[in-house]
Amino acid sequence: MKHAYVIGSGPNGLAAAIVLAQAGLRVEVFETEAEPGGAARTLPLTLPGFLHDFGSAVHPFAAGSPFFSSLPLADYGLEWVHGDAPLAHPLDDGSAILIPRDLTSLEESLGSDAKAWRSLVQPAVDHWAQFAADSLGPIVRMPRHPLLMARFGLKALGSAQSLSHRSFSGPRASALFAGLAAHSIASLDHPLTGAIGAMFAVTLHAVGWPVPRGGARAIPHALIGYLNSLGGVIHTGYRVTASDFAKLAAEDALVLSDTTPRALASIAGDRVGQRFHKTAERFRRAPGAFKVDYALSDPVPWKAAECRHAITVHLGGGFEEISASEYAVVHGQCSERPFVLAAQPTLFDPARAPHGKHVLWAYCHVPNGSSCNMTERIESQIERFAPGFRDCILARSVSNPADLARGDANLEGGDISGGALTLRQFLFRPGLRNYVTGAPNVYMCSASTPPGGGVHGMCGYHAARLALRRIRP
């Protein structure tokens, strides 16, 4: 095979395209939207001059991606911008937990729990390259660094609830860990949420939580620049239909799909096996996201000054409140006091708004496909920790799950993580054979394959490498 086609230009699709182009194949990428990048796009959603990230905003896994780190993306405009600290988590007493990147200076933030925190994350932080290669690899393979992974697994085993209770004695560390574990979009009593929270904790210190200068679009733009240098071509505003797919798959070429399992099954028809169709039918979506983008006249007036030193701010109080919020969502309800994830990139990348003005990116979790309007609840949570916030709002752009899916078809029902965090789908995404579809030249490479959601490109990287091994044994 000398030709390859990739459907979808999200970070995974572009990663797959680059791997195939590096191997000498002629690569074409087809993107439905006018702007490439999937959920990693930056758009003028509110007022002129204000640039908002459509989907992902803060990118620890992109900055720490084993594959992205191997590419000369800085030569194509990708520059990482860090806050003074990776993360702030305000509390109702007017204080905030500000987590430094430096593991040696945690006492001010976590007090007596600083030692337990270091014990949880330090081995993986000290050996990030090895840890990332295994934790962002295909799930069902033997790790290359089994002792490191076993040490991490023994510490992070179980639910976020159980890990927090056995590891931390104070409410500050527990609250901080709850916010990290809530990135799993699962109830915090779920047995995998401890590991998810611990992995996010590792990234705080190993790579930080940066934003790309100019917005999330800088990531796909850099990937496309490098892909173009290898001879790859991208077609935007082109939706691949069933008839298109039949023509592509009929050629002596590879086809990799950065789509959901249902979307691929729909356009592939009998080109993929019945087993894949059954897998697609039973693949479970994760809860959705409800997002609000703000154009602000001033920085968010946080009660705790520490919050002005971090791009990312977690809003939800203590462990019990965050846990209750995520439990409600998983059980089909919209939380009255949602856990809110907020990013304030213009504190450190001011060119994304007119002089002196700011943008704020904020979202919470809701049941998949929910029609709840969470705007007032999100703003109440922000106002709770930043009195006077509403007075700063110049404009807002509200995106419910249906809006997100219209902007990126992969976000089915607002699912931003490529599928629910069930034990089966953790081990086998989307099914027992992961990237394989039953057609010898057709593979999946989206976040619905291992290692799952996040802007890291590793799903595309592993899928493309598997495809190449199969055609060039």
Image: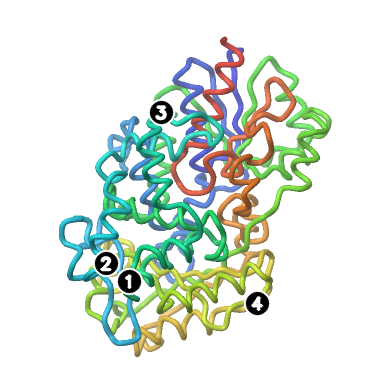
Mark 2 lies on residue: 113
Of badges 3 and 4, nearer the viewer stands 3
Q: Quadrant of the N terminus?
A: top right
Q: Toward which corner of the image does residue 256 lie, by quadrant? A: top right
* Picture layout, residue 212 above or below residue 316: above
What residue is shown at x 44% (from left), y 40% (from top)? 135
Across and down, in percent, residue 52 comes to: 43, 63
Of labels 3 and 2, earlier in sequence is 2
Marks 2 and 1: CB-CB under 8 Å? yes
Q: Disc 2 on helix, strand or loop?
A: helix
Tell me the CA gap for discs 2 and 1: 7 Å
Say which amino acid is labelled 2.
Answer: Asp
Mark 1 lies on residue: 169
Crowd around label 1: few <14 · some 14–19 · many ≥20 (10 Å)? some
Across and down, in percent, residue 470 comes to: 61, 16
Of labels 1 and 3, earlier in sequence is 3
Crowd around label 3: few <14 · some 14–19 · many ≥20 (10 Å)? few
Residue situated in front as seen by the camera: 399 or 65:
65
Return the mark for residue 144.
Answer: 3
Tell me the CA gap for discs 2 and 4: 38 Å
Mark 4 lies on residue: 372
Tell me the CA gap for discs 1 and 3: 34 Å
What residue is shown at x 28% (from left), y 60% (from top)? 116
Of badges 3 and 2, nearer the viewer stands 2
Marks 2 and 4: CB-CB under 8 Å? no
**Horizontal relation, residue 271 to residue 321: left or right:** right
Q: Disc 3 on helix, strand or loop?
A: loop
**What colour-coding does the image apply?**
rainbow
Across and down, in percent, residue 211 comes to: 33, 55
